[in-house]
Amino acid sequence: MAMEIKQHLKLSQQLVMTPQLQQAIKLLQLSRMELVEMVREEMMENPVLEDSVESGQELSRERDEVGAEADQDAKMMAAGETELAATDTSRLEKNAEVKTEGQAVGEIDWDNYLENYASAPPMPGSRPTGDDLPSLEATLTRRQSLFDHLSWQLKLAPFSPEEQAVGLLILGNLDPAGYLKDPPLDEIAAEAEQPLEVAERVLARIQRFDPVGVGARTLTECLLIQARHYGDDDDIVVAIIERHLGNLEKKNYTAIARDLAQPLEEIYEAAKVIMEFDPRPGRLYSTDEPQYITPDVYIHKVGDKFFVVPNDDGLPKLKISSFYRTALAGSPQAREYIQDKLRSAQWLIRSIQQRQRTIVRVTESIIKFQHEYFDKGIAYLKPLILRDVADDISMHESTISRVTTNKYVHTPQGLLELKFFFNSGISRTDGDDVASAAVKTKIKTIIAGENGKTPLSDQRIVELLLDQHIDIARRTVAKYREQLGILSSSKRRQVF
């Protein structure tokens, strides 16, 4: 069979991931802080881009300075003055040294000096004093860490240089809760080239630092250290800490009393003492900084309608620099470079605008589905999935997922993440479904109103929800309770 080459025409469609499309998808899934950082980096790399707000402020500042100088020159010309104003500091010095009748040469005329000094402008280096100054706490750049607090005490303790080196290694291996779990103490001693006895002696001293119990290797050791330090190390307290922490957590005081052969009242008193100890002594010196959230959009209620307003505060207002527009008439090499940067800048500006429009459209679609929630609260939150919003605004589910990730909205019900409005549905006996977030709120409300002596079991919560026409399984109640951080009924029970 002979082989030959032929040409065929074929029409087809395919999606090509161009660099511009990849950039648009990347912008869509960025959070607000990540977007600001990315725009700042792009402004540093692309000279064509500039912030219209900053350039406008700089231009206005220059105009004000020029206008102020022109006004000052006009006033001085009108008055016929060619010298400095009377409030100049050089003239103050001259006035201060003027000799009056009956005064010695070089003696200062304080009346004239103070009169001129009061009318003089403030010095550039002047600063407020007294109550106007910020407090010392307001000038701190960061909170004191656990390591800083303990190393300060270590330096004040009567340790030799070798013992201080071991102590610093111990402090450097403490976890945020204040425990020394890894590496073992013998490895720390070997690293410091000191005997294990020296490391144990230093650790025993560190465990009595403030906060007491820091440097413990187990919860039992931490509680025993605090019991001995505060003088509460009686036989019952020590026995409960060493042998019955599990029963103490479950509040099974009867089993503890039976094993220790002690009256139940004595076990109660010992449990009260142990509950005053801190199982995580290092948590007071946590250096975790609070994360402040800036909403991407605002939802305002005007009358009976809700309006979505994008939040552009803090975002650079990008524009094309007029300086580089005029440079297009230069050499061909410069023209090619500037045209490439212009295309990149225009695409970035369009992508950011498209991102803002997409977020607004998704938020408006959410309002359609969750209108009752914005009016009445969490109890009226409806089940919602990504496909519902995607079909409503004719977009793909992946686009909705990117838009709602790490995006926040300020609503009449508070500051919420856009993901909050997407919940699975729980069936009701009256036919309508309710969102899982609304069920969690009902469970939390029911537990908050229970009697501490007789807490409600998960099955009893199921029955109470069924009275409200919510059909839910017991294991689902247990799962939601754990997600809310609520203990089981046996651990919630208040004995004393």
Image (cartoon, rainbow, N blue to C red):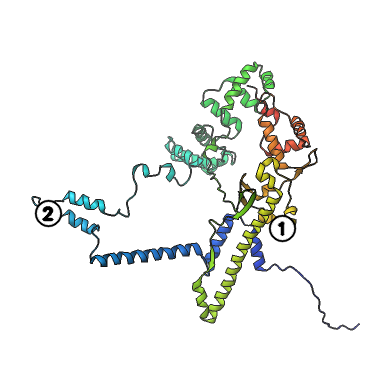
Q: Let me know if residue 27 appears in the view.
A: no
Q: Are marks 1 and 2 in contact (CB under 8 Å)?
A: no
Q: Is residue 34 left or right of residue 441?
A: left
Give the image location of residue 107, x and y in percent.
13, 51
- Depth-wise, is mark 1 or mark 2 nearer the camera? 1
Local crowd size for mark 2, using a 10 Å CA cut-off: few (<14), some (14–19), many (≥20): some
Give the image location of residue 323, x and y in percent.
49, 73
Q: Is residue 166 left or right of residue 310?
A: left
Establish if 155 lies above or below 32. above
Establish if 470 lies above or below 13. above
Find residue 351 and report its image quarter: bottom right
Q: Which residue lies under the disc numbered 1? A: 393
Q: Which residue lies under the disc numbered 2? A: 99
For this rendering, which residue is in front, 291 or 102? Answer: 102
Give the image location of residue 59, x and y in percent.
43, 65
Q: Amino acid at mark 1?
A: Ile
Give the residue at x 20% y 56%: 93
Give the residue at x 54% y 44%: 288
Q: Amino acid at mark 2?
A: Lys
Secondary structure category for the residue under label 1: helix
Point out the image quarter for the N terminus.
Answer: bottom right
For this rendering, which residue is in front, 402 or 111? Answer: 111
Establish if 130 lies above or below 326. above
Find residue 348 and report its image quarter: bottom right
Q: Let me know if residue 117 appears in the view.
A: yes
For this rendering, which residue is in front, 372 or 293? Answer: 372
Secondary structure category for the residue under label 2: loop
Give the image location of residue 374, x and y in percent.
65, 45
Find residue 72 and report its image quarter: bottom left
Q: Is residue 271 left or right of residue 382?
A: left
- Whole-Å distance between the Cαs marked 1 and 2? 87 Å
